[in-house]
């Protein structure tokens, strides 16, 4: 029995001081229900993915469920740091696969701007292994990825310019995405002259602090047939997951993410993908920092290890390249509201595979796409293959 | 509007790894080795994740290490405003152990040799420092 996605929704990403957490969730949920063309009452269970802590609502699943009209239907609250959204989609998928429910909604949401930047940095920095990392050394999330950048640059000669090229590409795509946090292009010079946040990463190497929500409605194949939604459904053809140690000092190296390698292998096997670049039309990768997108090209097998810098430089990940990556602007420019990010990636790939991406539409040959969602620095790893 | 103030300050239960924290005060950095299967741990832990026994030997990590990765932070998290200037975090390899620490100096290089030492910051928290060799 297959599981398909029948409806998706996504709020405007950015600084959303205009809404509460509940109101923000409502935007994506309403769009997803209308997109599916079903009644809200048809949804049997709700999964709420939110990393939490940065919002005043500390146990937000029930308030969100109440506001969206799902009281009594779940909720299951899931957390997997920045990969929370993918864990929510997986939970919805598993609930359907188990036969417990036929239609489940995965809601991903984060309000990160209710606290100030030093607090937000501390929440991120405390998300590794608190006692041995943050408590002693004041780690931050940009810092964790910067450490990987330092190792990747030293081993493979990856340059600051190559990192900046990822930001330029993703801003160029976000400029055409009305839901993106930053709907503006940037120049290479601007990126390369911005201040260091965590050396060697500069301001424009980092995703911003974002509020946003996204929702996906999943259903069993039988239900999809019954509802007459077969032509609209996008199927989940592959799922892969992995994780790594909490403590960075227990990692083998710092030039890639083992969680990406292992999750992609599992997803490729399930979806029968041997050559991702040839068999996929589009990919949404976890570019919380520019180095993350470069490492992902390599770890997902889009290019050889160490050649990620060349991959962006050659335009291989741009429209018209080998495989367009982060067509809606990526975490970098579309925004990275932690819980919403993984569901937002699913939203992007569903829109692409249905041919509804407007100015940002990719050419469809295989009608397959990939999402790659990382929590922490490879502390969680999720890969989905979607297809029609 | 603003929410009511909500202060979170946690107790840190360090009883089983007290030797580590005492060691820092004596200028020593300890890791642990499982007496049954030989698995090595830094940060130290007293339960073996590999063989599920809880008999470990405490071993000192010392001498020269090699920097594997680093960053210098220019945006500070809440709780580290006291440093007042960019600080550098590195992971260095000492034999079978990798250790996180603060690098004493500006921008290190991956592959650079460092010496391990301990010290206390202005807030009284003991930690590992890396001193450039030579």
Image (cartoon, coloured by chain):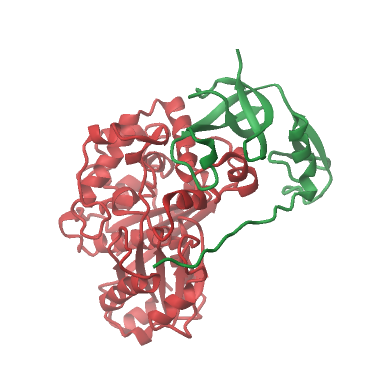
Chain colours: A red, B green
Do we see residue B46 in this rendering? no
> Who is closer to the viewer here, A274 or B78?
B78
In the image, residue A59 sits, relative to residue A322, either above or below, namely below
In the image, residue A266 sits, relative to residue B133, either above or below, namely below
For the image, the number of numbered tags is: 0
The answer to which image quadrant residue A297 occupies is top left
Quarter holding the N terminus of chain A is bottom left
The answer to which image quadrant residue A307 occupies is top left
> Who is closer to the viewer here, A219 or A345?
A345
Residue A41 place in picture, x, y as percent: 37, 87
> Who is closer to the viewer here, A355 or A22?
A22
Q: Residue at x 73, y 41 (%)?
A: B44
Q: Is residue A160 left or right of A265 when viewed as pictured?
A: left
In the image, residue A92 sits, relative to residue B34, either above or below, namely below
Q: Residue at x 61, y 48 (%)?
A: A129
Residue A324 place in picture, x, y as percent: 26, 47
Q: Is residue A49 left or right of B24 when viewed as pictured?
A: left
């Amino acid at each position: 029995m297959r599981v398909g996605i029948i409806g998706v929704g996504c709020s405007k990403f950015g600084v959303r001081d205009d809404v509460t957490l509940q109101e923000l969730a409502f935007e994506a949920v309403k769009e997803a229900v209308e997109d599916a063309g079903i009644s809200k009452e048809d949804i049997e269970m709700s999964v709420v993915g939110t990393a939490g802590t940065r919002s005043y609502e500390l146990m937000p699943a029930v308030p969100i469920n109440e506001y969206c009209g799902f009281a009594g239907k779940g909720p299951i609250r899931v957390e997997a740091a920045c990969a929370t959204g993918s864990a929510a989609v997986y939970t919805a998928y598993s609930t359907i696969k188990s036969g417990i429910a036929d239609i489940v909604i995965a809601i991903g949401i984060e309000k990160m701007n209710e606290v100030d930047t030093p607090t937000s940095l501390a929440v991120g920095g405390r998300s590794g292994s608190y006692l041995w990392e943050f408590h002693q050394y004041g780690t931050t999330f940009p810092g964790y990825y910067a450490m990987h950048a330092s190792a990747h640059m030293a081993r493979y000669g990856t340059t600051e310019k190559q990192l900046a090229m990822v930001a330029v590409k993703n801003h160029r795509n976000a400029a055409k995405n009305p839901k993106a946090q930053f709907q503006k292009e940037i120049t290479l010079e601007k990126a390369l002259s911005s201040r260091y946040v965590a050396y060697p990463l500069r301001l424009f190497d980092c995703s911003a602090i974002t509020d946003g929500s996204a929702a996906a409605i999943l259903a069993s194949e039988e239900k999809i047939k019954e509802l007459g939604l077969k032509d609209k459904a996008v199927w989940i053809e592959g799922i892969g997951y992995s994780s790594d140690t909490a403590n960075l000092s227990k990692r083998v190296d710092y030039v890639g993410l083992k969680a990406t390698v292992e999750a992609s292998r599992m997803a490729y096997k399930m979806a029968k993908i041997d050559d991702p670049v040839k068999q996929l039309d589009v990919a949404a990768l976890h570019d919380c920092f520019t180095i993350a997108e470069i490492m992902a090209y390599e770890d997902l097998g889009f290019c050889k290890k160490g050649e990620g810098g060349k991959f962006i430089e050659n335009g291989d990940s741009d429209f018209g390249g080998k495989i367009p990556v982060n067509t809606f602007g990526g975490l970098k420019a579309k925004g990275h509201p932690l819980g919403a990010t993984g569901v937002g990636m699913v939203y992007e790939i569903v829109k692409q595979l249905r041919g509804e991406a407007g100015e940002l539409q990719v050419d469809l040959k295989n009608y397959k796409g990939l999402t790659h969602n990382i929590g922490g620095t490879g502390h969680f790893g999720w890969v989905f293959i979607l297809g029609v | 509007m603003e929410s009511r103030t909500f202060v979170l300050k946690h107790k840190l239960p360090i009883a089983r790894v007290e030797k580590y924290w005492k060691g820092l005060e004596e200028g020593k950095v300890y890791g642990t080795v499982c007496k049954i299967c030989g698995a090595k741990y830094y940060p130290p832990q007293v339960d073996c994740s590999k063989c599920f026994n809880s008999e470990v030997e405490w071993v000192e990590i010392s001498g020269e290490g090699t920097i594997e990765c680093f960053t210098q932070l220019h945006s500070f998290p809440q709780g580290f405003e006291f440093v007042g200037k960019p600080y550098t975090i590195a992971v260095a390899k000492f034999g079978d152990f990798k250790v996180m620490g603060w690098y004493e100096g500006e921008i290190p290089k991956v592959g650079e040799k460092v010496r391990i030492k301990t010290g206390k910051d202005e807030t009284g928290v003991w930690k590992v420092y890396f001193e450039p060799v030579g």
